[in-house]
C-alpha cells in the first residue's frame, strides 16, 4: 500500500485529462476566434495612426463648453429623457412580469408556455434599443412616445428573466400550503408568489430604471426623443462646444441616478 | 544579552493602534532555537499582535525584532518578503485559500521562492512537489491532494495549514491560537502534529494558546502576558495558581 | 380574485404614511410623464395600423441578400475583440480600484476611470469614435471596449473588495510577492464570478455590436439601418432573425464555457 502510494506520489496533476481537454478546447477556440477576428476585420491603419491627433483636435474644439446652451435646449431634452425612462420602466414591468411568470417552471408548469415565454425574453433582449426605436418611429412617428415604447420592449427580456429566476427560487412550502387550501392558479400567483418576489420587483424596477436612463440617451439618434436629439443636432452642426455640454450633462445625470439607486437599495431593500 | 543559541530576539517592542494607548508595552524576549514556547494570557492582551508583529502582518510602533541577523521591524519590500518566507505561520481559522486544492495550498508555502509566472502555471520544482506530498502523508492527508480546501473538516484544514507553514522551510514557526476553533480531541491531535513536525525539521515554535492545559502539556516554556506586558516567563511547572491569577485576574475560575 | 389578493396584502403589510406619500408622488409623476409623451387614441390607432402593415411586410423574412453574413461576422468580430481588449484593460484597473488592496488615492483614480467608462452608452462613444477614427469596425471596437472596461472593471473590483482577507494574510505571510498574492490569494476567490462577468459582457457586446452600425461603427447594424431606410422590411426581418439566432447561440456557448471553468 505504502509503496504503491509512493510511486503514485511522483507527479501531481491539477486537472483530470477530461478537464484538461475541455479547458484546452475553450482556450484553443478563444485563440482561434481572436486570430480570425484580427486577421479578417477591416481596419484602415491610417485611421488608427491618425486617431490620437483627431481626438486631441476634438478635445480642443470641445473647450470652452457652451454653458449658455444648457437652459434653452439641453434641460428640456433632459427632462424628456427622464420621462421616457420612467414610462419605459413602468411599461417594461407591466409587460415583462407576466412573461416572467409564464417562463418560470414552477408558476407555469406548462412546457410549451415556458418555451414561448423564454423565446420572447431572449428575442426582446436581442433586439437592441436602437432597432426597437426604428420600429416605433416607423409606426408612431418621431418623438418620445416611440422612444418610451422602444426601451420598454427592450427591457421585457431583462425584467422577465430576473422575475422568472426570482419566482423559481420562491419557497415551495408556502405555495404547497396554498394549494392545500384549494387556491386557484391566479390566486397562487397573486397570494403565493407575488409577495415572495416583491423584493425582486423593487430591486428590478430600480435597477432597470437606472439602465433605462442610460439607454434613453441614445434614442435621439433615430429621432425618438430625449437628450440624444440635442447631441445629434450638435454633432450634425459640428458644434463641439455643445457636444461637450451634452456629454457632461449625461455624465452628471448618470452618476446622480446611480447614487440615488444605491442609496435607496441600501436603505429600503 | 542573547545567547548564541538565540533564534529570535525581541527588544523593547511597542505597538500602539491608537497613539498613546499601547497594546504591547515594551516586550523583550529571546526565543531559543528549539522547542515550543507557548504564550498564554487573557483575550485582548496583545498575544496575537505580538505574533503578527514578528512577521510584520502588523507593523510595530517601535522596538527591535532580530531574526537571522536582520531587524525585522525595519524591513520592507523584498528583504521583508525574504524574511517572511523563513517564518511559517499557522492561523486560528486556518486561512487556507478555499477554492484551491489541498496540494495548491501546501505548495503556496513556496510562493516566497518562485516567480509569479512559475506560480501561475503551478510549475513548482519536483523537489517541492515531493516535499509537499511527503508532508501531506505526514499529516495523514495523502489521499486529499486534489480535494478542494473547502471540502475539508476543521482539523484537516489545520493540518494543511501546518503543512503549508512547514513547506516554507522556515527557521521559526508562529502559531496564532491554532486550536481555538477545534474540538478538544482534534486540538490535541493538531498540537501533536505541530510538535512532531517542528521537532523533525528542528524548527522552534512560538504559539499563542487559549487552553492553558494544552500549553503546559506541549510547551517547554510558557510566557504569560497580561495588559501588554510579560508577567511570567519560565517552565510550565512553575505555572501555579498565583501566577495564573496574576495573568488572568480573579480566581473563581481556578476552583475547578 | 385580484381584489381578494390585494385586500389581504393590505391588511398584513399596511404601508407607513411616508411610504404612501412616496407611492402617490410616484404615481402623480408617472401620470404627468405619460401626458408629456403625447399619447392619443388617434395616434395609437394610426400607429397600430402602421404596425400591422409593417409586420405584414416582414413576411416572409428575406435571407437571400449577400450582405447579411459579412455584416454578422463583422459584428461577431467587434464583439470578440472588444470583449478581449476591454477585459484585458479592465483587470488591472479593477485591481487598482479595489479599496482593500490599494491606498485610497490609487483606488479613487481607478474608480473614476471606471465611472467615466460606464457613464456613456456605447452608441454615444461610437459616435465620438466615428468622428475620431472614421467609419468602420474600429470605431465599434473602441466603443464597446470602453463599455467593457466600465462593466468588467466595476463588477470585478466589487468582487475583489468582497474577498476574504484572511486568505490574503496567509499568502502574504509566506513571503509571497504582490503578484503571487494576486495569483494565489485573489484570483482563486474571484475567478468564478469573473468568468461570469466576462461571459455576460461578451453577450452584451454581441447584442450591442448589432447596434453600433446604426451610427456607422461597423457590423450588421449599418446594413439593418439602410434596409430600414429603403423600407426593405422583409430584409429587416431576415436580419433580425439572424441576430436573435446569433445571440441564442452565444448563450448556449456561454453556459458551456462556464461549466468548463467551474
Image: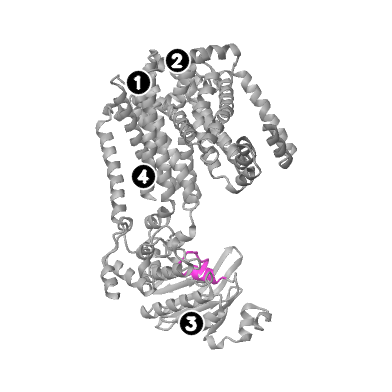
Q: Residue at x 50, y 51 (%)?
A: C162
Q: Nearer the viewer, mark 4 or mark 3?
A: 4
Label 3 neighbourhood size at 10 Å, few (<14), some (14-19), many (20+)? some
| Residue C131 visible, this angle | no
**Disc 2 secondary structure class:** helix
Q: Residue at x 62, y 22 (%)?
A: C33
Q: Nearer the viewer, mark 3 or mark 1?
A: 1
Q: Residue at x 30, y 21 (%)?
A: C67
Circles 4, 3 touching at the beta carbon (< 8 Å): no
For the residues labelled 3 and 2, the Cα–Cα distance comes to 86 Å
Circles 1, 2 touching at the beta carbon (< 8 Å): no
Q: Is residue C24 left or right of residue B127?
A: right
Q: Nearer the viewer, mark 3 or mark 2?
A: 2
**Tag on residue C257?**
4
Mark 1 chain: C
Label 4 neighbourhood size at 10 Å, few (<14), some (14-19), many (20+)? some
For the residues labelled 3 and 1, the Cα–Cα distance comes to 79 Å
Picture layout, residue B45 above or below residue A115: below
For the residues labelled 1 and 2, the Cα–Cα distance comes to 18 Å
Which region is colored magenta?
B46-62
| Mark 1 or 4, nearer chain start | 1
Question: How many discs appear?
Answer: 4
Circles 3, 1 touching at the beta carbon (< 8 Å): no
Amino acid at each position: 500500500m505504502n509503496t504503491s502510494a509512493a510511486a503514485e506520489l511522483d507527479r501531481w496533476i491539477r486537472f483530470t485529462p477530461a478537464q484538461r481537454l475541455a479547458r484546452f478546447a475553450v482556450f484553443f477556440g478563444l485563440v482561434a476566434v481572436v486570430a480570425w477576428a484580427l486577421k479578417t476585420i477591416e481596419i484602415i491603419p491610417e485611421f488608427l495612426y491618425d486617431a490620437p491627433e483627431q481626438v486631441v483636435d476634438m478635445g480642443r474644439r470641445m473647450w470652452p463648453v457652451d454653458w449658455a446652451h444648457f437652459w434653452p435646449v439641453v434641460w428640456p431634452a433632459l427632462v424628456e429623457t427622464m420621462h421616457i425612462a420612467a414610462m419605459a420602466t413602468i411599461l417594461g414591468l407591466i409587460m415583462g412580469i407576466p412573461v416572467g411568470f409564464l417562463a418560470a417552471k414552477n408558476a407555469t408548469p406548462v412546457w410549451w408556455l415556458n418555451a414561448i415565454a423564454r423565446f420572447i425574453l431572449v428575442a426582446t433582449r436581442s433586439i437592441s434599443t436602437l432597432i426597437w426605436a426604428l420600429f416605433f418611429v416607423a409606426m408612431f412617428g418621431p418623438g418620445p412616445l416611440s422612444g418610451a415604447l422602444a426601451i420598454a420592449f427592450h427591457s421585457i427580456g431583462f425584467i422577465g428573466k430576473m422575475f422568472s429566476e426570482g419566482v423559481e427560487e420562491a419557497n415551495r412550502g408556502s405555495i404547497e400550503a396554498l394549494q392545500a387550501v384549494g387556491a386557484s392558479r391566479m390566486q397562487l400567483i397573486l397570494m403565493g408568489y407575488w409577495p415572495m418576489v416583491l423584493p425582486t420587483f423593487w430591486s428590478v424596477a430600480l435597477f432597470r430604471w437606472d439602465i433605462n436612463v442610460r439607454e434613453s440617451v441614445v434614442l435621439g439618434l433615430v429621432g425618438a426623443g430625449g437628450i440624444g436629439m440635442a447631441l445629434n443636432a450638435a454633432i450634425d452642426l459640428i458644434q463641439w462646444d455643445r457636444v461637450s455640454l451634452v456629454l457632461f450633462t449625461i455624465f452628471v445625470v448618470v452618476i446622480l441616478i446611480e447614487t440615488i439607486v444605491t442609496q435607496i437599495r441600501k436603505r429600503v431593500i | 544579552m542573547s545567547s548564541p543559541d538565540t533564534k529570535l530576539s525581541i527588544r523593547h517592542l511597542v505597538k500602539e493602534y491608537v497613539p498613546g494607548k499601547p497594546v504591547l508595552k515594551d516586550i523583550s524576549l529571546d526565543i531559543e532555537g528549539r522547542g515550543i514556547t507557548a504564550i498564554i494570557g487573557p483575550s485582548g492582551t496583545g498575544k496575537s499582535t505580538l505574533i503578527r508583529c514578528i512577521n510584520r502582518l502588523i507593523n510595530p510602533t517601535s522596538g527591535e525584532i532580530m531574526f537571522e541577523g536582520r531587524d525585522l521591524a525595519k524591513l520592507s519590500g523584498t528583504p521583508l518578503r525574504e524574511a517572511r518566507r523563513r517564518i511559517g505561520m499557522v492561523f486560528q481559522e486556518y486561512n487556507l485559500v478555499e477554492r484551491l486544492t489541498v496540494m495548491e495550498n501546501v505548495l503556496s508555502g513556496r510562493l516566497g521562492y518562485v516567480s509569479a509566472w512559475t506560480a501561475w502555471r503551478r510549475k513548482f520544482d519536483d523537489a517541492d512537489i515531493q516535499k509537499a506530498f511527503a508532508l501531506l502523508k505526514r499529516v495523514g492527508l495523502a489521499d486529499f491532494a486534489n480535494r478542494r480546501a473547502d471540502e475539508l473538516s476543521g482539523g484537516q484544514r489545520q493540518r494543511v495549514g501546518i503543512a503549508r507553514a512547514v513547506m516554507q522551510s522556515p527557521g521559526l514557526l508562529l502559531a496564532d491560537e491554532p486550536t481555538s476553533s477545534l474540538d478538544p480531541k482534534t486540538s490535541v491531535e493538531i498540537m501533536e502534529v505541530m510538535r512532531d513536525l517542528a521537532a523533525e525539521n528542528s524548527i522552534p515554535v512560538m504559539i499563542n494558546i487559549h487552553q492553558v492545559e494544552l500549553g503546559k502539556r506541549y510547551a517547554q516554556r510558557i510566557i504569560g502576558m497580561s495588559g501588554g506586558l510579560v508577567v511570567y516567563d519560565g517552565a510550565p511547572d512553575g505555572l501555579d495558581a498565583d501566577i495564573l491569577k496574576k495573568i488572568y485576574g480573579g480566581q473563581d475560575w481556578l476552583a475547578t | 380574485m385580484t381584489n381578494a389578493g390585494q385586500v389581504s396584502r393590505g391588511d398584513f403589510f399596511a404601508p407607513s404614511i411616508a411610504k404612501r406619500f412616496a407611492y402617490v408622488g410616484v404615481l402623480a409623476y408617472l401620470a404627468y410623464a405619460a401626458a408629456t409623451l403625447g399619447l392619443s387614441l388617434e395616434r395609437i390607432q394610426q400607429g397600430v395600423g402602421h404596425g400591422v402593415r409593417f409586420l405584414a411586410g416582414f413576411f416572409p423574412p428575406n435571407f437571400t441578400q449577400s450582405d447579411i453574413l459579412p455584416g454578422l461576422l463583422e459584428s461577431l468580430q467587434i464583439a470578440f475583440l472588444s470583449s478581449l481588449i476591454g477585459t484585458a484593460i479592465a483587470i488591472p484597473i479593477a485591481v487598482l480600484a479595489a479599496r482593500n488592496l490599494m491606498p485610497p488615492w490609487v483606488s479613487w483614480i481607478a474608480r473614476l476611470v471606471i465611472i467615466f467608462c460606464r457613464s456613456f452608452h456605447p452608441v454615444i462613444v461610437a459616435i465620438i469614435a466615428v468622428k475620431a477614427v472614421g467609419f468602420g469596425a474600429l470605431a465599434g471596437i473602441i466603443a464597446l471596449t470602453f463599455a467593457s472596461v466600465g462593466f468588467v472593471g466595476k463588477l470585478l473590483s466589487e468582487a475583489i473588495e468582497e474577498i476574504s482577507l484572511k486568505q490574503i494574510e496567509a499568502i502574504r505571510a509566506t513571503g509571497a510577492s504582490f503578484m503571487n498574492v494576486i495569483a494565489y490569494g485573489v484570483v482563486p476567490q474571484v475567478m468564478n464570478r469573473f468568468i461570469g462577468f466576462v461571459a455576460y459582457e461578451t453577450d452584451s457586446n454581441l447584442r450591442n455590436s448589432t447596434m453600433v452600425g446604426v451610427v456607422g461603427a461597423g457590423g450588421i447594424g449599418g446594413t439593418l439601418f439602410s434596409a430600414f431606410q429603403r423600407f426593405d422590411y422583409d430584409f429587416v426581418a431576415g436580419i433580425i432573425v439572424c441576430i436573435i439566432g446569433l445571440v441564442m447561440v452565444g448563450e448556449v456557448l456561454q453556459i458551456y464555457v462556464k461549466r468548463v471553468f467551474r
